[in-house]
Image: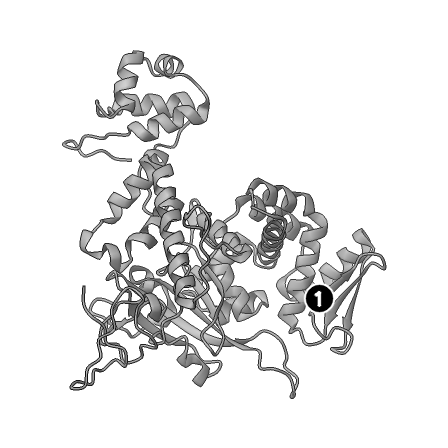
């Protein structure tokens, strides 16, 4: 953490938090650092700047990485606050990212309170818009938090990276000693010899409403015939994860402190899915393949014999310290625009009630099945992202069955685009960017020809004399 000669460094809140995390008194820390308790007190209250000598003593006394004392604009708290302050409601304040990082770092409790209040506000607006708002007796704002909301927020707070699961996956992968093309055979053998489990592929008539079922009593794992090869391999990895690391999954789920049993169960399944993906695509090998292929998902999926969606999802988890990948975000939508999956290795451009804007070409990908479409988009806060999208089919669909086609959208900040094969041939220095926003009900971009509803925060303005580009014109602030 280099210091400019003319810059004074005030780290009071972080120093105090470090001391409290260590569980020591000011007197004890002062002794360790070779300063007086009164001087340490002044440092913690930001009445004295931190000196290089004290920083070096901190690093030596507590085996500390000095980078941990710097503000991180990509920290979980800063990421959530960034979502809040990207709202049009705060646009005129012009809150800079470094200010957000400072608040999240020096006053994490205050940052969390702001995020909770904002989410409660959005929930109230959303329910009011749907005509389903109940009034609590005490009149307090009550955010609606479903199990999926809670789990998604928790995973996002961890930047979609879990070191304990990566370590467990590396161990299991090493034990299997199987190349990607041999994984299914190796997994079946391990299930049979170590756990006494036989794997059977069942006709769709036997499993009409599920694609995987484990019969604990008969020691049978049934996989539906509609699963693709990648889907069957992933199911085998999931079952191994549950059987061999169930205790770890339980520990991590309990440690997260979910509010109820359904949320806890969903979190455990999410952890098991993460572990299964890490077994199929070990971190180091996958990270290397992503960089070497310039993140060509088709080549990556072929190398690991996984699906397009599985490879994309894994790309959002590359946040290992010292070996980070491009911080992607990912969404999965159906043909009606409903989002069923959302993950990010960094800041996601929209809050959890934001939907996929109709101007984002993830929707148009349904018109060109199987083809990757790239696009540079600009969000209401002025940030630009490089995105690409493609349709996927998760299972084989019988002729008379319901369409299972979905679309996967991937994106990252524009500054990372040059590392992606999909950006070749595009002018990244002076790009043509498509202005997009969150769901129409909370988007305040004016004159949008694809607007489906007026924003709930603005007044609709319609008169007899003018026809606007947007079918729902609204008043400015």
Mark 1: which secondary structure? Answer: strand
| Residue 183: x %, y % from top left | 67, 62
| Residue 465: x %, y % from top left | 15, 86
Q: Residue, x 29% and y 11% (percent of image)?
A: 36
Please, is residue 162 above or below residue 474 in the view?
Answer: above
| Residue 120: x %, y % from top left | 40, 52
| Residue 443: x %, y % from top left | 30, 67
Please, is residue 66 above or below residue 60 in the view?
Answer: below
Q: Residue, x 19% and y 82% (percent of image)?
A: 463
Residue 25 appears in which quarter of the rendering? top left
Can residue 213 be seen here? The reply is: yes
Q: Residue, x 59% and y 68% (percent of image)?
A: 305
Q: Nearer the viewer, residue 297 or 440?
A: 440
Residue 231 appears in which quarter of the rendering? bottom right
Q: Residue furthest front?
A: 137
Q: Residue, x 65% and y 72% (percent of image)?
A: 229
Quadrant, the C terminus: bottom left
Direction from residue 80 to residue 468 in the image, left or right: left
Crowding at mark 1 (Cα within 10 Å: few <14, some 14-19, many 20+): some
According to the image, label 1 marks what residue? 212
Direction from residue 94 to residue 226 in the image, left or right: right
Q: Nearer the viewer, residue 396 or 254?
A: 254
């Amino acid at each position: 953490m280099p210091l400019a000669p003319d810059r004074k460094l005030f780290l009071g809140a972080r120093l105090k938090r470090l001391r409290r995390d260590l569980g020591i008194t000011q007197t004890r820390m002062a002794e360790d650092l070779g300063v007086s308790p009164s001087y340490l007190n002044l440092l913690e209250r930001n009445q004295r700047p931190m000196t290089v000598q004290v920083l070096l003593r901190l690093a030596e006394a507590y085996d500390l990485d000095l980078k941990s004392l710097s503000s991180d604009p990509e920290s979980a708290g800063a990421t959530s606050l960034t979502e809040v302050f990207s709202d049009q409601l705060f646009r005129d304040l012009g809150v800079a990212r470094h200010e957000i990082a400072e608040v999240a770092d020096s006053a994490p409790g205050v940052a969390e309170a702001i995020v909770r209040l904002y989410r409660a506000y959005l929930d109230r607006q959303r329910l009011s818009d749907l005509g389903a708002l109940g009034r609590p007796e005490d009149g307090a704002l009550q955010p609606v938090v479903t199990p999926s909301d809670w789990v998604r927020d928790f995973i996002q707070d961890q930047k979609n990276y879990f070191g304990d699961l990566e370590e467990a996956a590396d161990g299991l992968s090493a034990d299997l000693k199987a190349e990607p093309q041999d994984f299914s055979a190796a997994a079946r053998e391990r299930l049979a010899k170590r756990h006494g489990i036989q794997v059977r592929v069942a006709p769709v008539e036997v499993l009409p409403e599920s694609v995987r079922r484990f019969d604990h009593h008969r020691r049978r794992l049934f996989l539906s015939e509609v699963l693709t090869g990648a889907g069957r391999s992933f199911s085998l990895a999931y079952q191994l994860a549950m059987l061999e690391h169930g205790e770890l999954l339980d520990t991590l789920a309990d440690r997260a402190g979910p509010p109820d049993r359904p949320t806890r169960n969903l979190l455990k399944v999410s952890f098991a899915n993460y572990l299964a993906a890490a077994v199929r695509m070990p971190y180091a090998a996958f990270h290397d393949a992503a960089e070497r292929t310039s993140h060509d998902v088709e080549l990556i999926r072929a190398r690991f014999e996984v699906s397009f969606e599985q490879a994309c999802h894994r790309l959002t988890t590359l946040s290992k310290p010292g070996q980070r990948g491009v911080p992607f975000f990912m969404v999965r939508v159906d043909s009606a625009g409903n989002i069923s999956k959302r993950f990010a290795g960094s800041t996601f451009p929209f809050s959890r009630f934001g939907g996929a804007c109709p101007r984002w070409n993830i929707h148009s990908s349904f018109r060109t099945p199987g083809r990757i479409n790239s696009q540079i988009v600009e969000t209401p806060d002025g940030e630009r992202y490089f995105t690409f999208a493609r349709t996927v089919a998760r299972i084989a669909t019988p002729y008379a069955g319901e369409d299972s086609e979905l679309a996967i959208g991937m994106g990252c900040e524009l500054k990372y685009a040059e590392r992606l094969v999909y950006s070749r041939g595009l002018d990244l220095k002076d790009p043509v960017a498509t202005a997009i926003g969150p769901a129409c009900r909370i988007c305040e971009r004016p004159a949008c020809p694809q607007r489906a509803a007026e924003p709930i925060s603005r007044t609709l303005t319609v008169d007899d004399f003018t026809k606007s580009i947007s079918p729902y014109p609204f008043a400015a602030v």
